[in-house]
Amino acid sequence: MSNDSQPTRQRLPTVPPSVPVFNCIVHVHRDDQGNVQGRVANLPDLVCTAATERDLLAKIVKEFKRVIREYSEKETPIPWVVPPKAKEPNEQSRLIPVHL
């Protein structure tokens, strides 16, 4: 069998080292009205609500990026919460690597 019949392997794209990556730790839960609420555990005062978890995570990542960019543009240190806030018994945690 010739090598021509084997599928071509594609390499996964990589992020250039100059692109910063930040961990966004989100604790999520469903409220009494059926909405999904999430709060960023490692950045203060960042809370969002949406109809679905997917919508919530998209919304919270957008806000996370906005906040990080603001601190970066002002050349102000990012007020990371260390250690991150603990999750409540009714919450689940999501770790989202965020590229700016």
Image (cartoon, helix red, strand yellow):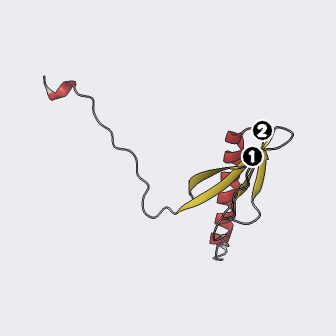
Query: Residue 27: horizontal and vertical position, in percent?
Result: 69, 53
Residue appearing at x 59%, y 53% in the figure: 95
| View extreme (bottom): residue | 76
Residue appearing at x 74%, y 46% in the figure: 29
Looking at the picture, which amino acid does disc 2 mark? Ala
Among the two numbered marks 1 and 2 on one chain, the one whose residue lies closer to the N terminus: 1
Residue appearing at x 64%, y 71% in the figure: 82
Image-based side of 59 in relation to 20, left or right:
right
Image-based side of 67 in relation to 17, left or right:
right
Q: How far apart are marks 1 and 2 (CA)?
A: 11 Å
Which class describes the residues within 10 Å of circle 2: few (<14), some (14-19), or many (20+)? few
Q: In what element is the residue under mark 2?
A: loop
Residue 2 circle label: none
Query: Residue 14: horizontal and vertical position, in percent?
Result: 40, 52
In the rendered image, which quarter is residue 22 located in? Answer: bottom right
Q: What residue would you read off at disc 1?
A: 29
Query: Residue 9: horizontal and vertical position, in percent?
Result: 29, 36
Which class describes the residues within 10 Å of circle 1: few (<14), some (14-19), or many (20+)? some
Looking at the picture, which amino acid does disc 1 mark? His
Residue 51 circle label: 2
